[in-house]
Image (spheres, helix red, strand yellow):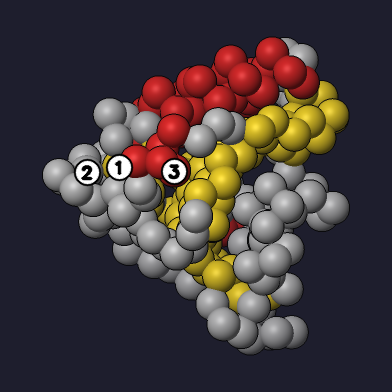
Amino acid sequence: MHFSILVPALLSSSAFGLAVPQAEDSKLMKRFYVPGASVEEGFTIPEDTPGGFYRVHIDDDGVAHHTKVNMNLEPTGEGTDTSSDLDKRQSWRVTCEGSSLNRNDADLTVKLLRDGCGSGHTVQPRDHYYVISGRVASYFCNNTSGRTTCSATIVRQQIQESVSSRCGTFKAGWARRDNSNGHVSVGYQNVNSQNSFCGLNH
């Protein structure tokens, strides 16, 4: 899958030599890096991250690369989802995190995640996507070693139906599907320094 990546504008941090978001430069920021990430624990989203749609990939040094992407993602082609037929039939398991979400931000992030995934878009191995508005992020995580597909149907069924039904309306939580080569998770949570996203426990 090819995402239309916006032109990066890196913001440097003299303390770590890493790009981090700065609120006053939010209109220019297209890419930033956050240390302290891992495949096991996932990544954090800085609280002052500007609203938008982001792709995240965690490198071998434990740095999460956040890149803002355009919403007009290219559709999947035939045979791009490498999950087996058995994997596709496996059920989703819901976990409730429990905290309350801002209704307007939650609604907007879910809508934009649905719009971005559309009728089906390939997500590369170990790639993750989130939409943030205010202090709420909705996300699609691919913790598998193969490509998988996000779609508006999956987002609607898992967040707006499964998570809302099990956890309560506008209560944080996620749905997880375990495959033979890893797992996929879809959900929404508050953005703060304690919450990680897309780790092995999601």
Q: Residue at x 39, y 66 (%)?
A: 8
Q: Quadrant where the N terminus lies?
A: bottom left
Above/below status of 64 relative to 192: below
Residue 97 location, x and y as percent? 81, 35
Q: Residue furthest left?
A: 78
Q: Residues within 10 Å of mark 2 (few under 14, many from 20)?
A: some
Q: Residue at x 75, y 34 (%)?
A: 95
Residue 191 location, x and y as percent? 73, 44
Q: In the image shown, does 7 or 121 lie closer to the viewer?
A: 121
Q: Which residue is mark 2?
A: 76
Above/below status of 23 relative to 133: below
State left or right for residue 97 relative to residue 173.
Answer: right
Do tag 1 and tag 2 residues touch (Cβ < 8 Å)? yes
Spatial separation of the CA atoms under disc 3 and disc 2: 18 Å
State left or right for residue 84 relative to residue 199.
Answer: left
| SS state under label 3 | helix
The residue type indicated by label 1 comes to His
Whether residue 76 is visible: yes
Q: Which residue is mark 3?
A: 87
Q: Which residue is mark 1?
A: 121
Do tag 3 and tag 2 residues touch (Cβ < 8 Å)? no
The residue type indicated by label 2 comes to Thr
